[in-house]
Amino acid sequence: MTTPLAACKAFIFDAYGTLFDFGSAVARCADIPDNKRNELITIWRDKQLQYTWLRSLQKNYVNFEQVTADALDFALEATGLTDTARRQNLLDLYQTLSAYPEIPGTLAALKTKNITTAILSNGTPAMLKAAIDHSGIGLLIDHVLSVENVGIFKPAPEVYQLAVDTIGVRRDQICFISSNGWDAYSAAAFGFQVIWCNRSGQPAERLPGSPTIIMKNLSDILALTEP
């Protein structure tokens, strides 16, 4: 079956939650009680995203490494887990988040078809390099694009435009892939073809834009590129 993605010349991936498992930092931190792990992951991620949106609205940009640390401080205090050594351990582990199991194979399959691949992320270049190196997918990614280049976080249109300007193809020739519903819908409103990798089965967002394809993971992405 022909899909709109068959005409896409570039596949651009969000990083955190899409390629890299945000929860893997907490999972590898041995001194967090089991009954606190999910709560810590949820609060940390929620605050991390909230701070990116609020700082964008305030026009008070700091890089994603600082936002991540600020969000962690809030989460540790909220869960009663504040500890200097634990904090540093979690920040270190965040630099080497694990890729989801299907990601290396998915990227390799796209490269066999000579499709341009990229990451477009809130993360700093150093953070993204650390995660890419840890996952061993560096040779499978053609471009690594950070919001550092525009000084504002997603879903600001300037961030999505960065991909268009860098890769040099039309918006509708880019397939953007994100596990974050707000990101997927915003990228669709910008004009990308979009795969929403809805790993957690979230409801549809009440936002402008609509994903082209919704899937649970990225194992079957190659079939969507067939004419």
Image (cartoon, grey):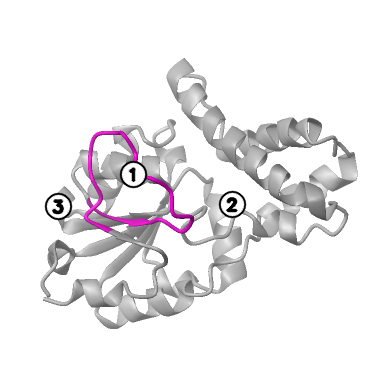
Tell me the mark number nearer the camera, choosing from 2 and 1.
1
Magenta segment: does it hold 200? Answer: yes
The residue carrying mark 3 is: 172
- Considering the image in quadrants, where does the N terminus appear? bottom left
| Among numbered discs 3 and 2, the one appearing first in the sequence | 2
- Residue at 14% over, 52% down: 172
Is residue 170 visible in the rendered image? The answer is no
Q: Give the SS element for disc 2.
A: helix
Circle 3 residues within 10 Å: few <14, some 14–19, many ≥20: many
The residue carrying mark 2 is: 127
The residue carrying mark 1 is: 204
| Among numbered discs 3 and 1, the one appearing first in the sequence | 3
Residue furthest top as drawn: 58
Q: In this view, does 70 lie above or below 144?
A: above
Image location (x, y in percent) of residue 152: 43, 31
Q: Separation of disc 3 and disc 1 at Cα? A: 22 Å
- Considering the image in quadrants, where does the C terminus appear? bottom left
Is residue 139 visible in the rendered image? The answer is yes
Magenta residues (range):
193-213
Decide whether the magenta segment is chiefly helix, strand or loop: loop
